[in-house]
Amino acid sequence: MDKAEILRLVETQQKRYSLPQAFYRDPDIYRHDVEEIFLKSWLYAGHQSEIPNVGDWFLFEFDEESVIIVRSAQNEVNALLNVCRHRGSRVCLESSGCSKRFTCRYHGWTYDLAGQLRAAAHMGESFDKSGISLMNLHVGLLDGMIFVNFAEDPAPFSLVREGLADCLEAYGLKNARVAHRQSYPIASNWKLAVENYTECYHCAPAHPEYSRGHSLAYPEARSQQISREVMARAGVCGLSDKAVSQMYGSAPAFGADYFFERYPLLRNHLTGSEDGQPVAPLLGSIRDFDGGTTDVQVGPVTFGLLYCDHAVIYRFTPLGVNSADCDITWLVRGDAEEGKDYDKDRLTWLWDVTTQADKAIIERNQQGVNSRYYSPGPLSEMEEFTWTFLSWYLQSIKSAA
Amino acid sequence: MDKAEILRLVETQQKRYSLPQAFYRDPDIYRHDVEEIFLKSWLYAGHQSEIPNVGDWFLFEFDEESVIIVRSAQNEVNALLNVCRHRGSRVCLESSGCSKRFTCRYHGWTYDLAGQLRAAAHMGESFDKSGISLMNLHVGLLDGMIFVNFAEDPAPFSLVREGLADCLEAYGLKNARVAHRQSYPIASNWKLAVENYTECYHCAPAHPEYSRGHSLAYPEARSQQISREVMARAGVCGLSDKAVSQMYGSAPAFGADYFFERYPLLRNHLTGSEDGQPVAPLLGSIRDFDGGTTDVQVGPVTFGLLYCDHAVIYRFTPLGVNSADCDITWLVRGDAEEGKDYDKDRLTWLWDVTTQADKAIIERNQQGVNSRYYSPGPLSEMEEFTWTFLSWYLQSIKSAA
Amino acid sequence: MDKAEILRLVETQQKRYSLPQAFYRDPDIYRHDVEEIFLKSWLYAGHQSEIPNVGDWFLFEFDEESVIIVRSAQNEVNALLNVCRHRGSRVCLESSGCSKRFTCRYHGWTYDLAGQLRAAAHMGESFDKSGISLMNLHVGLLDGMIFVNFAEDPAPFSLVREGLADCLEAYGLKNARVAHRQSYPIASNWKLAVENYTECYHCAPAHPEYSRGHSLAYPEARSQQISREVMARAGVCGLSDKAVSQMYGSAPAFGADYFFERYPLLRNHLTGSEDGQPVAPLLGSIRDFDGGTTDVQVGPVTFGLLYCDHAVIYRFTPLGVNSADCDITWLVRGDAEEGKDYDKDRLTWLWDVTTQADKAIIERNQQGVNSRYYSPGPLSEMEEFTWTFLSWYLQSIKSAA
């Protein structure tokens, strides 16, 4: 689809309606999404606890890109493009490891932990290693969470870090550790997955497990007495009741969105678990369960849920025009021991069952959108934030034109 | 391939030769086939006996389209596009079922059996449900056989129904029921599958099982004594010996083709079975086996074989430029009981073994056509009807240009 | 990618650097590769010993093409396109066989071993069989090795045969036979596979098994005493120490390249095997192991290794823009018996383990080249021949423009 046609679709888009089919199928639009959104946004790569020691690394993969996230000799976090500067081979082959240097197994070119080329045989006398290194990406750190940005000159991550500093403090995520990480591939365009995440209109019909405990499933609940009671307890428990919303259209710079809001759980739920009872030790400096939970967002496609005893981080990335990855990380206190302080199955139950349901829902949405007779339909009052996302998305297309 | 090139191929096509490679491979030509042929033709969806009660439904799937074929509260047959009018999710997820209403499992939008929206939560006060319904397709009924047409203003199905009424009467297909239904995916362009179906030049070399009993495999047989004898018996057995041929170029309107002709079986065969002996009770008002069988066709891609004791319906649809579906339905008398009145394996044996052989043949045809050195070859005297099909096909391209 | 863009890439190519990504991914460039290189080059199809008797045949498959390599009634080798001249079906379905005539199983058209149509039913009185035959490809024979060329007017194969006659004589390949043949599919563009084959820069880091015995892995070894000693023994053993190099830019005509050079094995290795010890009887008229091995090349994508006791033939062909086939044939003396004179596992061990390693290496190379941040890197002194290949390749693009 050529640019003029795409822009015509943007111009004729009806407000608070879903998008035309082309946005979920067209390869040119998909290319825009990858180049103009994902390659220019801060993307969650992982947590510092996954690379505790110098030389520890793991791969962050996106589209055709493979990035080595490594703890450097200076104890910093580097993001190195996993492409040898000789003839382009992948350098690191496993999904994680610990290395003093990175040696390409094709021709033996060897790089240090900062990506600088250190050895290459038979290159002739005039060859100058000093100018050659694995490409470095920009890295942003937020309480132990590692974000990367493929852009040469990305939006400053400090805007995000400073905007969320107070809100996040009590959760002590810097000292958390990964209890479980899992990838859920979804046979749909990435936007259908984000649309699904950004509205709770589907929660009551589709997620009985979630809806038992979370007030977001019921718009009327948020103005009730329960909300006031829980928010009042937040301070006692050591939590901030501050809310910030600098998302999408209101983000401080493209790809550096952030959001934080606490809201009540329902019916004696203390956390997001099958029975509402705690599944891990209290996080950070939190003193007690306040009966609430937090929605957080960093960048346009990374979301989080902060319970008092654990955190869940969601990242959506495209795998193709009709294929997306939903990557979920469960974090607990850094000193919590599996089997003793928490049970992994109990910890992950709610968001595993909910994500599996979402995967099915989203894939059926894509199937229906594929019909040539599909036409965009009206959004409900509970899909206002989805419309915020879609408006921002359409604006990104106008800006790129 | 652009339109001018395609038209040049049509103009330079040699009469009674197979088509150039592009017609079996080119994505633009494939798009024409779907949009101009399949979406404008009457397509067999199923038989009324598959949905005997109000609320019974099954899905008819074609290309990216999913259609709910449902028996309505008024005891009629509706064809509803299986795409929610909210954000486009599939509404029915299984291949068949029985429902009082159709509730989309994504956000709970609920439709009645006519497709009218009946419930949708949180849509605001100004929302008017009355103008919203699942899209209805045109439906045509022919003695219990359900046909659908995706066009807004299709050729009237009454032309077909009236043209075939007398011929079909004795078979009582309205009161038949589905004994078996099976899909045979074929790795070829759909036209190679239809070409195969429309000629019996390959029967003798490729289908020994069929050729034992069917005179079509031997052109000389049709003018022999056997033919006259069998046709003479038709009337005694309660069958019409009338033949109609309003196919392809002679169809009354695009996509509303029909054809009916009875011809002799061979060597004491009474029906299409492994040994030529009956496999089910006589259909409709047929009084005895007359030693013949009927070829029938409705629309450009649905074919049938009417034996005295059972009917076989063949539908060809594309699954992609090099992938087609051959969907076969075996019908028996409505009151015939499996295990007592018929054995399913005996009933389906001949056309299962023949279709599996055809699948292999057609796929090897596609493989050869894929060669850049393939060139169209001359058709035999036994492929005259295939040429009728191809001429009509080429004309459809000229008309669309 | 349009021609102007491709040519711009060729013009701006830095000498002795790897190629830009487009050459490994772009479908238009891939089409050039198939049409201008593979369809115009002499390609190894197999060895005469695979079809010892009249009517013996095997299929040579390339891209969408299937070719019947058959021993004719006149005891010659024919290459017939496996596409029926009627409606294009594949005629031979198995990978090899022995036939008096070729009968298409679709409609029974029957061809003789020269491809001439001999029988076709129901074609009418005016039909003239005599002008119809399976398409014949040009065939070149080199000491029993069968090469085919899809071009109408290919470079004369005699140039190759005459150029290599003296060099090859001692190996007696005409009387050799196939001990094993195996296909290794590689998920990469074909050029990455040929690049890999044309340099031994990767041998020391990636192939410990090969590097134990082959001096090519160590550039310094070739000028050492060992080289002189081994070459001196060649004559005593009945081998020619002649070298010819008419490859790529210096080939006598496009697609008719050839190359022959003998070089020393290392550390008491007598042949290419796990322990360096013989694995089969001496080939042809060779009198003893001289401690050397030969690299041979015929056409741009067929390579060979001639040890004193066996030969290994490598052919690279594309299966798609990012998929290639590496077909390997192991040849031994024609009178050698498996189990008695040689053990197949010992015979094939070295190049099986080496090819499996190469497959992994090449696939990781493609993965890295797929990165949008990949940029061509400098070649080493040990990749000079790879640069010869790449220069020729780039020239083929300029010539075709």
Image (cartoon, coloured by chain):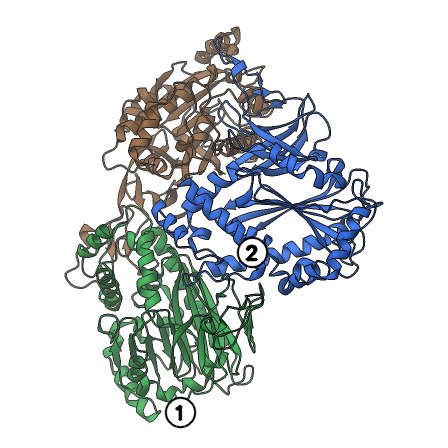
Chain colours: A green, B brown, C blue
Quarter-of-image position of residue C354? bottom right
Q: Amino acid at mark 1?
A: Ser
Q: Is residue C369 above or below residue B380?
A: below
Would residue A227 be visible to someone looking at this image? yes
Please state the chain letter of the residue tagged with numbered disc 1 in the rendered image: A
Front-lying residue, A308 or B235:
A308
- Closer to us: B24 or C214: C214
Q: Quadrant of residue C211?
A: bottom right
Q: Which residue is mark 2?
A: C384
Residue A84 place in picture, x, y as percent: 50, 66
Q: Is residue A279 visible?
A: no
Quickly name the residue at label 1: A285
Give residue B194's quadrant in the image.
top left
Q: Nearer the viewer, residue A260 or C198?
A: C198
Residue at 53% from the left image edge and 83% from the top image edge: A53
**Mark 2 Cα within 10 Å, few/some/many (few <14, many 20+)?**
some
